[in-house]
Amino acid sequence: MKEVVIKIPDPKFKFFMELMDQLGLEVFQRYDISEEQMNIVMERISLSDSDPDRIQNWDEVKNKFGSDK
């Protein structure tokens, strides 16, 4: 299998994704984040792994703040 990296202009992105779906092709989005951001995320994952009680249920948090999304 070949891998191709392309840049899609924002106005064409939805059309591109629909086309890829129709063709049955896999699409992976990559997000560029800084090393500092990655370190923060990895630290939080590590903290959550070592203390699962610090993780909150999303539905409970959402209800607490009155969000319906």
Image: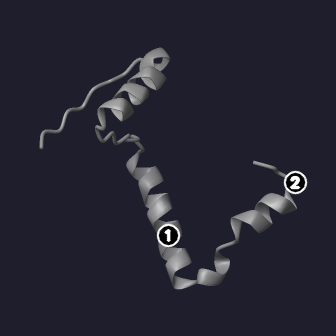
Q: Residue at x 17, y 38 (%)?
A: 3
Question: Residue 21 placed where, x, y %?
Answer: 37, 34
Camera-side residue: 43 or 6? Answer: 6
In depth, the one of 68 and 31 nearer the eye is 68
Determine which quarter of the picture holds residue 8. top left
Q: What kind of element bears circle 2? A: loop
Q: Which of the two discs, 1 and 2, sits closer to the camera?
A: 2
Point 52% across, 84% down: residue: 50
Residue 34 location in percent, x, y?
Answer: 41, 45
Which residue is at a point 65% across and 83% down the rendered structure image? 53
Kindly indicate the quadrant of the structure image that contains residue 56.
bottom right
Tell me which label, 1 or 2, sits earlier in the chain. 1
Q: Residue at x 78, y 58 (%)?
A: 62
Q: CA distance from mark 1 to mark 2?
A: 26 Å
Q: Nearer the viewer, residue 66 or 53?
A: 66
Within-10-Å neighbours for mark 2: few <14, some 14–19, many 20+: few
Question: Which residue reaches farthest left?
Answer: 1
Give above or below for 13 relative to 23: above
Q: Secondary structure at mark 1?
A: helix
Looking at the rendered image, the quarter that the N terminus falls into is top left
Q: Which residue is mark 1?
A: 45
Q: Is residue 18 above or below residue 11?
A: below
* Residue beneath disc 2: 66
Q: Amino acid at mark 2?
A: Gly
What percent of the width, then of the height, locates residue 23? Answer: 30, 31
Q: Decide if residue 10 is on the left or right side of residue 5.
A: right
- In this picture, residue 33 sits left or right of residue 48: left
Q: Which mark is residue 64?
A: none
Report crowding for label 1: few under 14, some 14 to 19, many 20 or more residues within 10 A (C-alpha). Answer: few
Viewed as shown, does residue 38 lie left or right of 62? left
